[in-house]
Image (cartoon, rainbow, N blue to C red):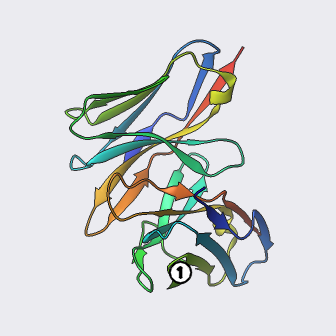
C-alpha cells in the first residue's frame, strides 16, 4: 500500500519560531511537492523537488525553504513563522513519467499564534 | 499564466447526477485530472484524461474534455452521500519540470 506520511496532523507554533514540517514517502518516487491549502484558493505550490538535493520554487515560495537530503524525505521549513502562514500543508510525491499521478499525505494543519 | 478555475459549491439530491466544471489555461497540458478530498484527508486521484481524448468513462464517473474551449467536466451518476467531498481539477504544466496546478476545489454536498 503506497504511503506518504506527514509527521504531524496538527501543530501550533508561535510567531517568529522556526518550524519544520516533515514528509516521508515509501514509493521510491523521484518527485516530491509541498502545497498549502486555503479555503477558496485551493492548493498552491510552495516548492517541489525532482531529485535528491534538488529543489525548485513553486508559485508561493516566500517565507519558506525546503530540504531533500534523502530520496524518501522532503522537509518544509518556515524560517520565521508568521500568522499568515496559518494553513493546511499537504505533501505529495510522484514518479517522473506520465500519467504523473500524485500521492498525497493526510496534511498538517499549522496554526501560528 | 497558469490558472485552473472551478465553481466553489454544488448541492445535489441523492440519486441525481452531479456535474462539476473546470476551465484551464495551458493548452499544452497533456493530462488533466480530477482529485477528491474527503473531510480530514489528503487528496486522492479519482481519474484522469489524456489530452487527445474527448471522453473517459469509469463506472459512475464520466470525464468530458473540450480542448477548443479548455473546459473539463466530471459527471457523477447516481450521486451518493459518500460522494460528498471537495473535488479538484488539475492540469500538468511543463516548464522544464512537470508540475501539477490545481483549481480552488468544488465542495459537493449531497442531501437526501
Check disc 1 and report the residue beneath it. A66
Query: In the figure, B71 relative to A106: above or below?
Result: above
Compare residues B78 and A38 and report the one nearer the observer: B78
Query: In the figure, A19 relative to A37: above or below?
Result: below
Tell how many labels: 1
Compare residues B55 and B104 and report the one nearer the observer: B55
Q: Residue at x 45, y 37 (%)?
A: B6
Where does residue A99 sit, x and y in percent of width and height? Answer: 35, 51
Q: Residue at x 19, y 33 (%)?
A: B68
Q: Quadrant of residue A54?
A: bottom left
Q: Residue at x 51, y 18 (%)?
A: B77
Residue B54 shown left or right of residue A101 in the figure: left
What is the chain identity of the residue bearing mark 1? A
Residue B67 shown left or right of residue B76 in the figure: left
**Of all residues shown, which one is farthest toward the front?**
A1
The answer to whether one can see residue B112 in this image is: yes
Query: In the figure, B40 relative to A90: above or below?
Result: above
Where does residue B81 sit, x and y in percent of width and height? Answer: 69, 24
Where does residue B112 sit, x and y in percent of width and height? Answer: 72, 13
Mark 1 secondary-structure assignment = strand
Q: Around disc 1, counting alpha carbons within 10 Å, would you say few (fewer than 14), some (14 to 19), or many (20 or more)?
A: many
Q: Quadrant of residue A80?
A: bottom right
Where does residue A12 sit, x and y in percent of width and height? Answer: 80, 70
Q: Residue at x 59, y 76 (%)?
A: A76
Residue B13 shown left or right of residue B101 in the figure: right
* Quarter of the image that includes the C terminus of chain A: bottom right
* Quarter of the image that includes the N terminus of chain A: bottom right
Residue B102 shown left or right of residue A42 in the figure: left
The answer to whether one can see residue A113 in this image is: no
Amino acid at each position: 500500500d503506497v504511503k506518504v506520511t506527514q509527521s504531524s496532523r496538527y501543530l501550533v507554533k508561535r510567531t517568529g519560531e522556526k518550524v519544520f514540517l516533515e514528509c516521508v514517502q515509501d514509493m521510491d518516487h523521484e518527485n516530491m511537492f509541498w502545497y498549502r491549502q486555503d479555503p477558496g484558493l485551493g492548493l498552491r505550490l510552495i516548492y517541489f523537488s525532482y531529485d535528491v538535493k534538488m529543489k525548485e520554487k513553486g508559485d508561493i515560495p516566500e517565507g519558506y525553504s525546503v530540504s531533500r537530503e534523502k530520496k524518501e524525505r522532503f522537509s518544509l521549513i518556515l524560517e520565521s513563522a508568521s500568522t499568515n502562514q496559518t494553513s493546511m500543508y499537504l505533501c505529495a510525491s510522484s514518479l517522473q513519467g506520465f500519467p504523473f499521478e500524485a500521492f498525497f499525505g493526510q496534511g498538517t494543519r499549522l496554526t501560528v499564534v | 499564466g497558469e490558472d485552473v478555475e472551478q465553481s466553489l459549491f454544488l448541492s445535489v439530491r441523492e440519486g441525481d447526477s452531479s456535474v462539476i466544471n473546470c476551465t484551464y489555461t495551458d493548452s499544452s497540458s497533456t493530462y488533466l485530472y480530477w482529485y477528491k478530498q474527503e473531510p480530514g484527508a489528503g487528496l486522492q486521484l479519482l481519474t484522469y484524461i489524456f489530452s487527445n481524448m474527448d471522453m473517459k468513462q469509469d463506472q459512475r464517473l464520466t470525464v468530458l474534455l473540450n480542448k477548443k474551449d479548455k473546459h473539463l467536466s466530471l459527471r457523477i451518476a447516481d450521486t451518493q452521500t459518500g460522494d460528498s467531498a471537495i473535488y479538484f481539477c488539475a492540469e500538468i504544466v511543463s516548464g522544464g519540470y512537470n508540475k501539477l496546478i490545481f483549481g480552488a476545489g468544488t465542495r459537493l454536498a449531497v442531501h437526501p
